[in-house]
């Protein structure tokens, strides 16, 4: 579908209460672990981040509740404490920079010139760190410079190059996204999927897997079609899961650059239907991921252990990052446990939690919620009436065509249930399996999650 302009009424058909898809259930065969030093590392990283005075105390308090240290510990459980701490510092920087580009309160969200300048400064830190000077109004760049100095001191040249190359792709994609927001153009689903693979920053965090495991995967293996395809499938899983969980926050800011919104607008369906459609895309991406794991060939006895460790690292990173969404207060505030248990959330929850809805908006949302309940009640009544009618028809049918009747009994037909088709086509790998024997067994070989899984939750 061609690009379309964002409509103010694009979500008017959306229900007041939304049922989230069960993404965690779909990922039950992914291994999940948490680093034992996560809590100590999180405290130290938060203190370091706060030393740069990037935000006032009340915002920093909310920042801490996002628990980016927990996300790091869940995503990179097999590293040492030093590398975990450096990576945790980077995650805080990454989300702070992402918020600068996404929050309506930021001057960078719709300002292409300002976002271009910020991107240039961040890349300058990586390419010419000795020339860096603190920039007024952008303390995140100073923190990034400190992180990069420590990263380089503990990383190989290959790790540094991989990190720099993927960061360039990320900041350029975010810069382009800011330009698209300014033009108020909603991309097609295909355009969005392609752009999202770079704006998600997942390629950068993939580079952190090699760093945390202290391995250098040779380019001939890292860019092999099977390894590239499983990384792309993993990127889609996490990016689209993030779009599901962050939809309400982004809707409140009027941001169309979210897969749920893009699907709803392009297909002219409700948010609930779009959620279900996106879930079918995630299911397809999970299937792709495991299929590509089976296709990874042998690269020789010296390289194979590194490839095995990297693929396992991708699996742990994906599961830890996805599960973190429903352990953190970043997306659902203090109601996150309720949302996790019920998979139910309300539209504009973010604004309600922040007290940003005026009396008129609260009344309108309440009216919409009541209307939704009434429609649900009417739907149930219609279903009951239809069942009663079918039962009466069935009884009349058997009365007419008794066993003693010589007439042939015509077949009974029922309409097939409507389901959203699984998303496939251009986003399925399409890579022919290697003729060599695969060295990787699918991470999903075990039917259930492994024993000893620990997920910390703040008390």
Image (tube, rainbow, N blue to C red):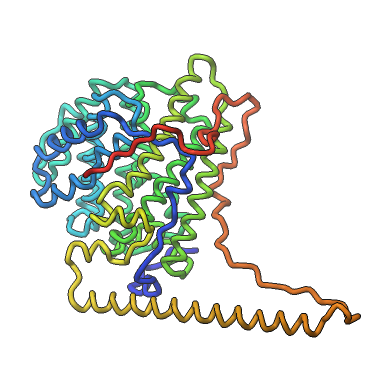
Viewer-side residue, 331 vs 374: 374
**x and y percentages locating residue 240 in the rendered image:** 41, 51
Q: Specify the farthest residue to the right.
A: 406
Residue 119 at least partly seen = no
Marker count (numbered): 0
**x and y percentages locating residue 236 in the rendered image:** 44, 46
Q: Is residue 130 left or right of residue 409?
A: left
Viewer-side residue, 85 vs 22: 22
**x and y percentages locating residue 354 in the rendered image:** 18, 62
Residue 85 at least partly seen = yes
- Vertical relation: 409 (above or below) 442: below
Residue in the image at 13% along x and 51% along y: 59
Q: Locate residue 164: give its quadrant.
A: top left
- Vertical relation: 264 (above or below) 225: below
Q: Is residue 227 left or right of residue 183?
A: right
Residue in the image at 25% along x and 32% along y: 38
Q: Locate residue 434: give its quadrant.
A: top right
Q: Specify the farthest residue to the top.
A: 302
Viewer-side residue, 379 vs 195: 379
- Vertical relation: 77 (above or below) 393: above
In which quadrant of the rendered image does the C terminus lie? top left
**x and y percentages locating residue 191 in the rendered image:** 44, 54
Residue in the image at 27% along x and 47% along y: 328
Q: Is residue 446 left or right of residue 216?
A: right
- Vertical relation: 285 (above or below) 124: below
Q: Locate residue 148: give its quadrant.
A: top left
Residue in the image at 39% along x and 32% along y: 452
């Amino acid at each position: 579908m061609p690009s379309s302009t964002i409509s103010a009424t694009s979500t008017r058909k959306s229900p007041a209460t939304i049922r989230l898809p069960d993404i965690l259930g779909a990922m039950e065969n992914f291994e999940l672990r948490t680093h034992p030093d996560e809590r100590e590392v999180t405290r130290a990283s938060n203190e370091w981040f706060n030393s740069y005075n990037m935000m006032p105390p009340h915002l920093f308090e909310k920042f801490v509740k996002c628990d980016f240290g927990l996300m790091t510990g869940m995503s990179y459980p097999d590293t040492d404490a030093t590398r975990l701490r450096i990576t945790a510092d980077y995650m805080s920087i990454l989300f702070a920079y992402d918020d600068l580009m996404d929050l309506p309160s930021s001057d960078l969200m719709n300002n292409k010139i300002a976002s271009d300048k910020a991107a240039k400064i961040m890349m300058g830190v990586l390419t010419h760190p000795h020339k860096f000077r603190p920039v007024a109004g952008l303390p995140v760049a100073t923190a990034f410079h400190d992180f990069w100095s420590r990263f380089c001191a503990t990383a190989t040249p290959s790790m540094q190059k991989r990190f720099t190359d993927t960061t360039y792709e990320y900041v350029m994609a975010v810069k382009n996204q800011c330009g698209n927001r300014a033009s108020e153009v909603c991309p097609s689903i295909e355009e969005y999927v392609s752009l999202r693979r770079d704006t998600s920053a997942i390629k950068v965090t993939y580079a952190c897997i090699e760093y945390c495991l202290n391995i250098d995967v040779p380019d001939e293996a890292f860019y092999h079609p099977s390894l590239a395809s499983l990384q792309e499938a993993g990127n889609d899983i996490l990016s689209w899961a993030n779009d599901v969980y962050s939809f309400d926050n982004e809707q409140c800011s009027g941001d169309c650059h979210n897969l749920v919104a893009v699907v709803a607008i392009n297909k002219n369906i409700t948010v609930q239907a779009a959620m279900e459609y996106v879930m079918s895309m995630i299911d397809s991406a999970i299937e792709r991921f495991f299929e590509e794991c089976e296709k990874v060939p042998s690269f020789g006895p010296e390289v194979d252990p590194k490839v095995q460790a990297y693929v396992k690292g991708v699996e742990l990173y994906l599961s830890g990052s996805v599960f973190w969404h429903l352990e953190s207060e970043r997306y659902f505030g203090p109601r996150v446990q309720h949302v996790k248990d019920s998979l139910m959330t309300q539209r504009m929850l973010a604004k309600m939690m922040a007290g940003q809805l005026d009396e008129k908006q609260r009344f309108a949302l309440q009216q919409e919620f009541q209307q939704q309940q009434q429609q649900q009640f009417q739907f149930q009544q219609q279903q009951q009436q239809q069942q009663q009618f079918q039962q009466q028809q069935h009884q009349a049918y058997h009365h007419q065509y008794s066993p003693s009747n010589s007439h042939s009994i015509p077949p009974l037909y029922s309409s097939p249930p409507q389901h959203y088709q699984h998303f496939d086509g251009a986003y399925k790998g399409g890579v022919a399996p290697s003729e060599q024997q695969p060295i990787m067994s699918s991470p999903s070989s075990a039917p259930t999650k492994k024993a000893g899984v620990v997920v910390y939750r703040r008390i």
